[in-house]
Amino acid sequence: MNSESKGKLSGIGASEGAAVGPVFVHAPGELEPRRKTIAAGEVEAETRRFREAVAKVVANLGETRERLAEAGNEDEAGIFEAHAELAEDPELHEGVEERVKNLESPESAIISVGEEFAAIFAGMGDEYMAARADDVRDVASQIAAELMGHEASGLSTLDTPSVVLARSLAPSDTARVPKGMALAFVTAEGSATSHVSIMARSMGIPAVVGVGQDLEAAFGAQTVAVDGGEGYAIADPDPETVAEFESKRRRIEQERSALDEYRHVEARTAGGTRIEVSANLGSAGEAEDALSWGAEGVGLFRTEFLFMERPELPSEEEQYEVYRGVAEAFGEKPVIIRTLDVGGDKNLPGVDQPEEENPFLGWRGIRMCLDTPALFKPQLRAILRAAAHGNVKMMFPMIVDSGEVREAQAIFDECRRELYEEGVETGAVEVGIMVETPAAVLGAKEIAREVSFFSIGTNDLVQYTLAADRGNERLRRLQSADHPAVLELIGMTCRAAKDAGIWVGVCGEAAADPNLIPKLVQLGVTELSMSAPSIPRAKKVVSEI
Ligand code: PEP
Ligand code: MG
């Protein structure tokens, strides 16, 4: 056994970087209500106390939000805004006040109602919604803590730079850590899209999540070494491993600052081919950050998160405001809005989705939209209206043939006509598709006649080509686009596009992979879209081709 594997904890690399430091275990006891019941004469006073506690929590969340926004951390600020909204949710209040009327103490009531809400989110069988369940629990426990007159977490007292180990970390936990005191986060729960991961990435703090039960064995360790890129941590590393991680950390830091000069360059290969490097966005709040990383546009705006963040569907007006916000932030730079891609591993509250045996082969993406105009049309109308304020393009996900493209285009044309008749301003919108099924590649020649661009979704193209579920941990070997069959399909897509005179981009994870970028460019890809912090490195790789 080598020194590394002794206390090795494997998880998901959620935020790149390396760190070694003393352990701080964040293990808040389950919040126990002090009293379960109240006396009949106390209902009014206890209801008032509950409302005051909510107001206090909302005020605290507002302060944190402002502090983060002033520091330019818009994403995190957005999380605290959403928490404040949750704390003020009328249904949550109704639930608690009803219980208080039935003589339950408000602290007990908020914990129970928070749990009920969380169970609904968690039961949606979706990673993203499961993370929202944690948000509800977080807000409920803050209100309960306020009612019981104590702080919900000891993290704010951290006064030595440390590696924080926890079963899970809520956004309010991460934000409570004094600046500079968290060297890294390691959590038992969580995925790449959970909030601790989002926050760690934008705070530039290494993080490994989803370590599982094994993490508890490390709670007694003195120090932990963390590699947030590779996704593992080592409890009580020996001096040799510590030295290795220290040099890894220095190397990563040097690499990062050396890449700064590439942020705002126009990427071009040595042979002069211009490659546009754009950002993938999951929310409008990420736009400014993406621009600061050097995004030359948005290559993929995943709109489903806007739909999934809430119990009811967003209206056309709300969608218009969001799309317009991103279009305006990017000015003349292109913003490609992908129409709703739910189904598969993403469920949609507000839409009656059937239980499916094989959701990734099921009622997903464009299939659901074509069958549900009430869902599709408000989005298309919002996109057309937002296009009056910027350089907006649109693409359809999960296309398998030109018939689907024509059908979607017909609905789009109908929306444009309706808006014209209503006298509502619209803008020009180029239409493309995501190439993420082998069928779309095989039909690329025909489909290319219908659209202005192709954007290859390698995450799905890999899973559908290699018959390998993209979320199955055991299939890591089959989850890379660097496979001859996948590269052949990418080449076929590029040739069909070239013949038809349209361009091809890649917006799957492969676009940020330094080993794959040269291959993609050689095959004829001219746009790469990725998570914003990867942009400078991708530009550098392109300039060295
Ligand atoms: C893809 O499939 O590569 C893609 C970019 O879309 P998503 O990851 O949202 O399915
Ligand atoms: Mg996809």
Image (cartoon, helix red, strand yellow):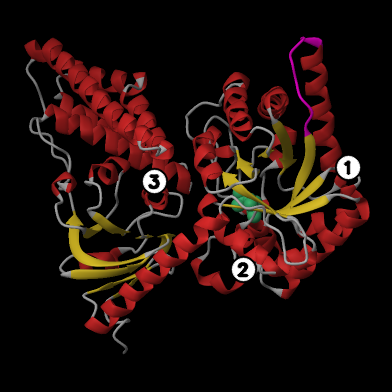
Q: Which of the pair 124/418 is nearer the observer?
A: 418
Mark 2 residue crowding within 10 angstroms, few (<14) / some (14–19) / many (20+): many
Q: Which range is magenta?
A: 421-429
The circle on residue 195 is 3
Look at the image and say whether residue 69 sits in the magenta stretch.
no
Q: Nearer the viewer, residue 117 or 386?
A: 386
Residue 429 position, x and y percent, is 77, 32
Q: Is residue 235 above or below residue 259?
A: below
Q: Which dot marks residue 152? A: none
Question: Of helix, strand and loop, which one carries label 1?
Answer: loop
Q: Identify the residue position indicated by label 2 in the image.
A: 480
Ligand 1 within 8 Å of the CB at mark 2: no
**Disc 2 residue type (three-letter):** Ser
Q: Helix, strand or loop at disc 2?
A: loop
**For the residues bearing labels 3 and 1, Cβ distance under 8 angstroms:** no
Queried on whether the Cβ of the residue with tag 1 lies below 8 angstroms from ligand 2, the answer reads: no
- Disc 1 to disc 2, C-alpha distance: 29 Å
Cα distance in 3D space between marks 2 and 3 = 25 Å
Image location (x, y in percent) of residue 240: 27, 84
Query: Residue type at mark 1?
Result: Glu
Q: Which residue is mark 1?
A: 450
Residue at x 32% of width, y 81% of height: 5
Hey, which quadrant is residue 541 in on the image? bottom right
Q: Please identify the quadrant where the N terminus is shown.
A: bottom left
Q: CA distance from mark 3 to mark 1?
A: 39 Å
Q: What x and y, as percent, mark residue 258? A: 49, 63
**In this picture, residue 275 sits left or right of residue 166:** right
Q: Quadrant of residue 105?
A: top left
